Amino acid sequence: RGVKQLADILLVPEPEPTPLQAIVEDEIARLLGASARQAAAQFRESPAGRLATNVLDPFGLLKPLRDGPLLNPDEQDETVLESSSKIAAIAERPTREALEMLRGLPSDQQQRALDSVVRTLWENREGAGYVLQRLQDRLRQQVAVRLE
């Protein structure tokens, strides 16, 4: 039931987002961007990342891009990542309990629950498509702002 309610709120099949969708989508896009920049920075500092840099850019021609705001996390990214970690910590226990409850069900009831989730997602596929398109647009906007 919770999946259906969440889908009805967040996967509205309209090109324009509801105010709640806009807030959630903005935060997801910020989290995706911050996570990608953090992963890129961590990779560059790893032995494999240093090797890749030396092999792919031995003369340092890509250094401005590599060291620029597009690929490096900033203070805002750190704030977004810290906030998402706090939210994940709050959601961990109820999520774990729900999964344990699901695991405790007989296999036919587990299958029915899974079928219900899949059916809900399928019924909301149009809304999911709009959400994904808007997330893509927001991520593109992030890149444009960082390249200014």
Image: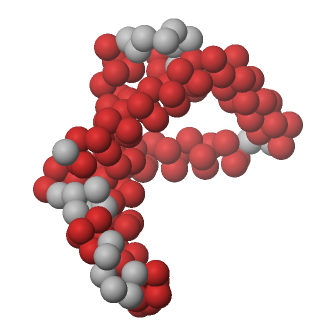
Question: Residue 6: x, y in percent?
Answer: 50, 22
Q: Quadrant of the C terminus?
A: top left
Q: Position of residue 118 (x, y in %)?
A: 73, 30
Q: Residue at x 45, y 42 (%)?
A: 94
In the image, 4 versus 52, the foreground residue is 52
Residue at x 38%, y 88% (from the top left corner): 58
Foreground residue, 147 or 88? 147
Work out whether 13 lies above or below 100: above
Determine whether, in the image, residue 81 is placed left or right of residue 138: left
| Picture quarter with the N terminus | top right
Identify the image's colour scheme: rainbow, by chain, secondary structure or one colour: secondary structure
Residue 43 in percent (x, y) is at 40, 76
Q: Residue at x 33, y 72 (%)?
A: 62
* Left or right, 148 with reference to 1: left
Q: Residue at x 22, y 58 (%)?
A: 69
Residue 8 vs residue 53, the one in the foreground: 53
Vertical relation: 96 (above or below) 65: above
Q: Position of residue 5 (x, y in %)?
A: 53, 17
The answer to whether residue 9 of the structure is visible from this angle is: yes
Which residue extends farthest right? 108
- Image position of 110 (left or right of 35): right
- Do we see residue 7 in this rendering? no
Q: Quadrant of residue 101?
A: top right
Q: Nearer the viewer, residue 134 or 20?
A: 134
72 above or below 4?
A: below
**Which residue ends up furthest to the left in the rendered image?**
75
